[in-house]
Image (cartoon, rainbow, N blue to C red):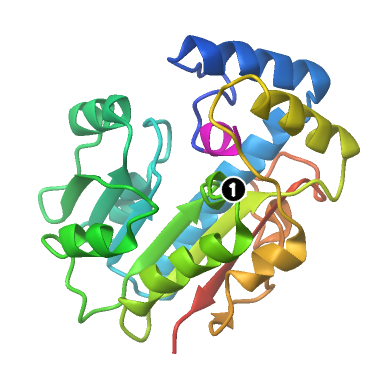
Amino acid sequence: MLCLLYRGTVAGDDVLDRAVDREAGDQYRQVFPGVVDVARASRQFLVRSIMFLAAEAGVRQFLDVGTGLPTANNTHEVAQGIAPDARIVYVDSDPLVLVHARALLVGTPEGRTAYIDGDLHDPAAVIAEAGRTLDFQQPIGLILSGVMGHVPDYETARSITRQLLASLPSGSYLSLNDGTSLISAEMQQAQDDYNDTGAIPYTLRSPDEIVGFFDGLELVEPGVVPCPRWRPDDAVDTPADIDAFGGVGRKN
């Protein structure tokens, strides 16, 4: 559920295209209306982290795994808005997502935007295909926004993250955010109810577990925090403490 929420498919005015997910999403909001703020906070964090990577860290390549349906402020729009020559590879295993992405996500003439039919559970294949567009001798910004909860086993999720990072050169970055149930007990109840509907399940994790995804990386200040507290700007319009934690780490 959180991946769908995070990538804009139910937050705000957007809707889900799958009936089971749409119905389950409506039930989720009834149990925990604050999930809309969680989704917005995650999206705003994603945008700010890309802005940091492109503007301050000088990253010109991005690998966005689990992109979801296109919405506002997509990765290539933010990155190429700062650096028109930026290269972006989107990865998703949903045919519907890929159809929408190819039709709607058009990058700048100076840069490149590509789309991979890839599975998060097969990082080697993702890296191999991304190598057709990205130069793995130069720093890459790896984006895992609200997707690792779709890997129920924590050690498996960490292994996938490590395998993706292992293929990236020094100077690359990881931007990752995921859902927790630290702030609100209703969040966990709503997620459990959602997972029981037959829709795409999602596992909420503790902030410490989210920190664990950054093992071996140098965390960018302020570290792993509730998304609205990560380098906030005037666009932040959600409560400061919320069940979405994120951070950015550098590979040395």
The C terminus: image quadrant:
bottom left
Mark count: 1
Q: Residue at x 72, y 21 (%)?
A: 28
Q: Which of the 4 image quadrants contains residue 123?
A: bottom left
Q: Which residues are magenta?
A: 1-6
Q: Amino acid at mark 1?
A: Gly
Crowding around mark 1 (Cα neighbors within 10 Å: few <14, some 14 to 19, many 20+) is many
Read off the residue under disc 1. 149
Queried whether the magenta region covers residue 191, the answer comes back as no
Out of 150 and 37, give the one closest to the viewer. 150
**Image position of 19 with respect to 130: above or below:** above
**Image position of 103 with respect to 248: above or below:** above
The secondary structure type at the circle numbered 1 is: helix
Percent position (x, y) of residue 243? Answer: 76, 46
Percent position (x, y) of residue 121? Answer: 39, 53
Q: Is residue 189 left or right of residue 61?
A: right
Percent position (x, y) of residue 122? Answer: 33, 56
Q: Is residue 73 left or right of residue 122?
A: right
Q: Is residue 111 left or right of residue 146?
A: left
Q: Does residue 191 appear anywhere in the picture?
A: yes
